[in-house]
């Protein structure tokens, strides 16, 4: 502490109210660096605050010099912008805010500034500062207030700091009104809130509050003025809450209207502005403003950290979109979960049909390879063929097993809204068993049919062409590429990521379709109606609204399966895809082309041994990422996740058959 005292004496000796702007601000930065010390603990920083107060209070000359420095500081730096705008984006566009944060990450700041926000970022840059500020007690805060007390008042007799706070409230209030009047929000606010017009009267209520706070009508006693001030404060606070509720009503219409990053950005900014106004009002209305001011400064420090974080920007603006994507996927995923024997058998039949159609897909894939095109054109042709096959499976109401997990995971997570109840956990475990059972049925149906169907197609091709579907070299290469001894496991996990990515693309596409009201445009646009006719336009609008998610998922997945290996090969990454149904069909084609002798080749059995792992990784990886996203969207805590895991393991030990066969 003696060394700290010596450092403090040297620091205080450099306190010069007449120094230029840069030197004054450098002194302030050095002062707070000294208060933080080695950041050992917030309590140590509090001890240094007491040491600073003792040193200043013991020397009247130093106390007057500090007050003079503070007067110069408040006259040259606009604190209103700090209080009103710090922590908020000056723009309402995600991309421009992202570029601004990236600029601040790369480029250094300068203390030669009159922008209080830039200076605050250099003086109090981290979460540690919020910690020790929060620990300051009322005695220390009162001592700080006495040291910095400014005797200057404005013409109305009120201290200048009160006008500064009220100006900050005014700036924030104008931003709230501007956001509420923006077309994006105004057109989406519910009819009930729209009729009440809360944003229209906000500034009038604020003017009344300002008048009661700074103007003293003649003939009123202190009690009457206090009562009028409190009435104006309550009216403004209630109006502010009504504005916040009005903006929140936008969220209830997202299912019909969709959502965009820009809209989420506006809503979050508006909500945070309302909270900032309430914090400023706490400082204004409190009879002892010190603790309220300390809380406000601590929140400004935290807001600054969030404001500078690129990760926080992405997380805050993607959480609502994640919720909407998972909710839209959940609607589709419900159709893939079987809960009784009848639906279980239907799933097996649909999967069998999907397996039969996949055999044709494998045959076409070998046909594309036979054309000997370049890597890109082979990948593009394969991708388009996969996409067409997956869309055909969708339109024929058949099932491809690996498409299910990324859709069923959000449907499963949607049941976690009431997870606090024990009964909800049991219901969730039942749903897990239903899901796993459905997935097993789909995989068995796909693989169980694609193999004999592919053998039959290979036999027909051999009869028609007079030679096997694959020559000996290509058949052996196919088996080797799918062997468990190679990188098949890695490729299968990579394919699971592609399956998850396709589900995200599906959710975003459907959200964009709804956001831009394309179904309504197809139904009522005069030009489209003139081409298709009114009745056909209505049918197409309904058809696209129903199938747009599936189209986006199937087409994107097909193109990724075809093109990504080609792009990876161009960059020398050596990545490939392994889809369980397609892989099983390829093995069957290679075996049928080789003949009965293949049964004596180890390569066949190593490839067959890889099929269960390919299926498990396709399913589990895509399900894992989709379920994690859904858990985040529904804000499921770590404790609840632990309860879920324990309940699932308990079910596995007591009733393992329920995960494979219906009751």
Image (cartoon, grey):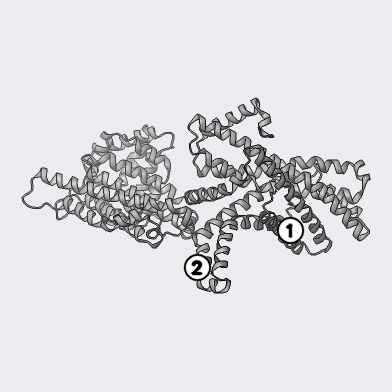
Q: Is residue 185 above or below residue 641?
A: below
Farthest left residue in view: 219
Circle 2 Cα neighbour tier, 10 Å, few/some/many (<14 / 14–19 / ≥20): some
Asked if residue 598 shows in the view, the reply is: yes
Image spot of residue 4 (x, y percent): 37, 35
Q: Is residue 110 above or below residue 330?
A: below
SS for dot 1? helix
- Quadrant of residue 382 in the image? bottom right
Circle 1 Cα neighbour tier, 10 Å, few/some/many (<14 / 14–19 / ≥20): many
- Quadrant of residue 431 in the image? top right
Image spot of residue 589 (x, y percent): 85, 51
Q: On the rendered structure, is 398 left or right of 452?
A: left
Q: State the CA–CA distance, disc 1 to disc 2.
A: 42 Å
**Which residue is found at the position 52% from the left and 38% from the top?**
416
Question: Which of the two marks, 1 or 2, is nearer to us in this view?
Answer: 2
Q: Is residue 77 above or below residue 492?
A: below
In the picture of the structure, the residue carrying the numbered disc 2 is: 524
SS for dot 2? helix
Image spot of residue 385 (x, y percent): 73, 60
Asked if residue 77 shows in the view, the reply is: no
Image spot of residue 591 (x, y percent): 87, 48
In the picture of the structure, the residue carrying the numbered disc 1 is: 566
Dot placed on the residue nearer the N-terminal end, 1 or 2: 2
């Amino acid at each position: 502490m003696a060394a700290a005292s010596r450092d403090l004496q040297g620091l205080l000796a450099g306190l010069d109210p007449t120094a230029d702007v840069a030197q004054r601000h450098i002194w302030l930065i050095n002062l707070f660096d000294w208060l933080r010390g080695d950041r050992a603990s917030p309590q140590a920083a509090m001890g240094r605050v007491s040491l600073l107060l003792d040193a200043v209070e013991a020397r009247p000359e130093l106390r007057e010099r500090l007050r003079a420095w503070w007067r110069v500081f408040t006259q040259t730096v606009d604190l209103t912008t700090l209080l009103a705008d710090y922590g908020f984006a000056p723009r309402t566009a995600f991309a421009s805010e992202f570029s601004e944060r990236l600029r601040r990450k790369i480029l250094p700041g300068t203390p030669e500034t009159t922008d209080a926000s830039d200076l605050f970022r250099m003086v109090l840059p981290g979460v540690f500062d919020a910690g020790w500020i929060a620990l300051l007690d009322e005695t220390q805060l009162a001592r700080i207030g006495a040291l910095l007390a400014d005797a200057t008042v404005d013409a109305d007799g009120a201290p200048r700091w009160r006008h500064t706070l009220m100006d900050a409230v005014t700036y924030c209030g104008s931003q709230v009104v501007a956001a509420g009047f923006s077309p994006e929000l105004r057109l989406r606010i519910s009819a009930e809130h729209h009729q009440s017009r809360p944003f229209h009267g906000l500034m009038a209520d604020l003017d009344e509050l300002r008048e009661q706070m700074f103007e003293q009508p003649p003939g009123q006693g202190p009690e009457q003025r206090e009562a009028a001030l409190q009435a104006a404060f309550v009216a403004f606070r209630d109006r502010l809450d009504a504005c916040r509720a009005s903006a929140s009503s936008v969220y209830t219409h997202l299912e019909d209207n969709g959502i965009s990053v820009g809209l989420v950005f506006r809503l979050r900014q508006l909500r945070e502005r309302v909270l900032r106004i309430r914090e400023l009002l706490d400082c204004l209305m409190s009879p002892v403003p010190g603790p309220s001011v300390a809380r406000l400064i601590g929140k400004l420090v935290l807001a600054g950290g969030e404001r500078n974080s690129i990760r926080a920007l992405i997380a805050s603006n993607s959480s609502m979109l994640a919720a909407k994507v998972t909710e839209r996927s959940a609607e589709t995923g419900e159709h893939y979960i079987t809960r009784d024997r009848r639906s279980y058998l239907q799933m097996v039949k649909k999967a069998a049909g999907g397996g039969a159609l996949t055999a044709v897909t494998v045959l076409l894939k070998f046909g594309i390879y036979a054309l000997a095109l370049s890597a890109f054109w082979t990948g593009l042709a394969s991708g388009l063929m996969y996409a067409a096959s997956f869309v055909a499976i969708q339109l024929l109401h058949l099932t491809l097993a690996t498409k299910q997990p990324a859709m069923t995971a959000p449907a499963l997570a949607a049941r976690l809204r009431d997870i606090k109840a024990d009964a909800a956990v049991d219901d969730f475990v039942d749903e897990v068993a239903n899901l796993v059972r459905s997935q097993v049925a789909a995989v068995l149906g796909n693989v169980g049919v694609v193999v004999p169907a592919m053998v039959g197609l290979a036999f027909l091709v051999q009869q028609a062409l007079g030679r096997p579907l694959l020559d000996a070299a290509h058949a052996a290469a196919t088996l080797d590429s799918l062997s468990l001894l190679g990188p098949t496991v890695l490729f299968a996990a990579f394919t699971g990521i592609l399956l998850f990515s396709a589900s995200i693309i599906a959710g975003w596409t459907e959200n964009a379709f709804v956001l831009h009201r394309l179904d309504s445009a197809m139904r009522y646009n005069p030009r489209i109606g003139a081409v298709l006719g009114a009745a056909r336009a209505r049918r197409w609008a309904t058809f696209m609204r129903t199938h747009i998610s599936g189209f986006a998922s199937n087409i994107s997945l097909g193109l990724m399966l075809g093109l990504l290996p080609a792009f990876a090969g161009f960059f020398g990454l050596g990545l490939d895809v392994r889809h369980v149904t397609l892989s099983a069909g390829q093995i069957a084609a290679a075996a049928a082309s080789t003949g009965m002798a293949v049964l004596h080749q180890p390569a066949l059995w190593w490839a067959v041994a890889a099929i269960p792992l390919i299926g498990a990784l396709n399913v589990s990886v895509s399900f894992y990422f989709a379920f994690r996203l859904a858990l985040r969207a529904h804000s499921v805590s770590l404790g609840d996740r632990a309860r879920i895991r324990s309940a699932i393991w308990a079910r596995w030990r007591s009733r393992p058959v329920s995960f494979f066969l219906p009751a």
